[in-house]
Image: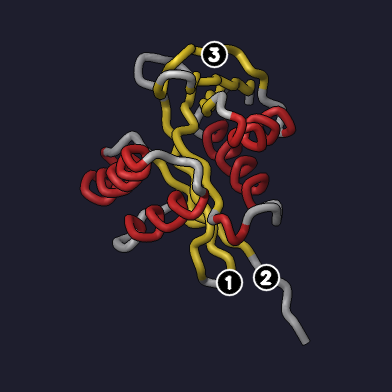
Amino acid sequence: MATMATNQFRNKAIPGDEKVVREIVTSSGFFYDNEIELAIELVEEKLKEGEQSSYQFIFVERDGQTVAYSCFGHIAGTENSFDLYWIVTHNEFRALGIGKLLLEETQRQAKEQGGRNLIAETSCLEKYEPTRHFYRQMGYTQTGQIPDYYKEGDDKVTFFKKL
């Protein structure tokens, strides 16, 4: 008899997460090499600086395997705004509702820490339409677009949600 898969959240970055984050982000096929390296650098900073780091992580473990993560944090110089830096589900685990659960948990934790605004950004490229749809579906409003932000023809699209 098959058992139902279970998802668990983990808030603490642990050694080895650098490799896991590389695998998750690379599997998506969405990110440039320099973005993948940045994702890993944020995990390395968290491991090095611990609670002193402004980056916070939530990892989703499904039957013992880390399959998704988010990285978020308070925006310096603001009273109650948070940035959603990363939210990525391993390609093999997409369309199972894991991203929705992860974003809901990220929002909950940001709100618990006094956050009232959560800002997310993504690309305007066609391959990111599912990402933009996801944010809209989760109650985010598109608030801006900066032309040629990532590179020529690749605008940054900003989304906002009041928590």
Which disc number belongs to residue 5? 2
Determine the residue located farthest toward the left in the rendered image.
48
Q: Is residue 67 left or right of residue 96?
A: left
Instruction: Identify the image's colour scheme: rainbow, by chain, secondary structure or one colour.
Output: secondary structure
- Position of 55 relative to 75 (above/below): below
Query: Split into 4 quadrants, where in the image is the N terminus?
Result: bottom right
Between marks 1 and 3 in the image, the one whose residue lies nearer the viewer: 3
At label 2, counting other C-alpha atoms closer than 10 Å, the crowd grade (few under 14, some 14-19, many 20 or more) is: few
Q: CA distance from mark 3 to mark 2?
A: 38 Å
Earlier-in-chain disc, 3 versus 2: 2
Tell me the element at label 1: loop
Q: Is residue 118 left or right of residue 13?
A: right
Which disc number belongs to residue 145? 3
Earlier-in-chain disc, 1 versus 2: 2
At label 3, counting other C-alpha atoms closer than 10 Å, the crowd grade (few under 14, some 14-19, many 20 or more) is: some
**Residue 25: image location, x then y, percent:** 45, 49
Which disc number belongs to residue 160? none
Please tell me which residue is depicted at 44% across the width and 16% down the height of the picture. 148
Please tell me which residue is depicted at 55% across the width and 20% down the height of the picture. 157
Question: Where does label 1 land, which residue?
Answer: 63
- Going by the numbered disc 1, the residue's amino acid type is Asp
Q: Are marks 1 and 2 in contact (CB under 8 Å)?
A: yes
Q: Are marks 1 and 3 in contact (CB under 8 Å)?
A: no
Please tell me which residue is depicted at 65% across the width and 32% down the height of the picture. 129
Q: CA distance from mark 1 to mark 3?
A: 39 Å
Earlier-in-chain disc, 1 versus 3: 1
Q: Are marks 3 and 2 in contact (CB under 8 Å)?
A: no
Return the residue nearer the eye: 146 or 114.
146
- Going by the numbered disc 3, the residue's amino acid type is Gln
**Residue 51: image location, x then y, percent:** 30, 43
Between marks 3 and 2 in the image, the one whose residue lies nearer the viewer: 3
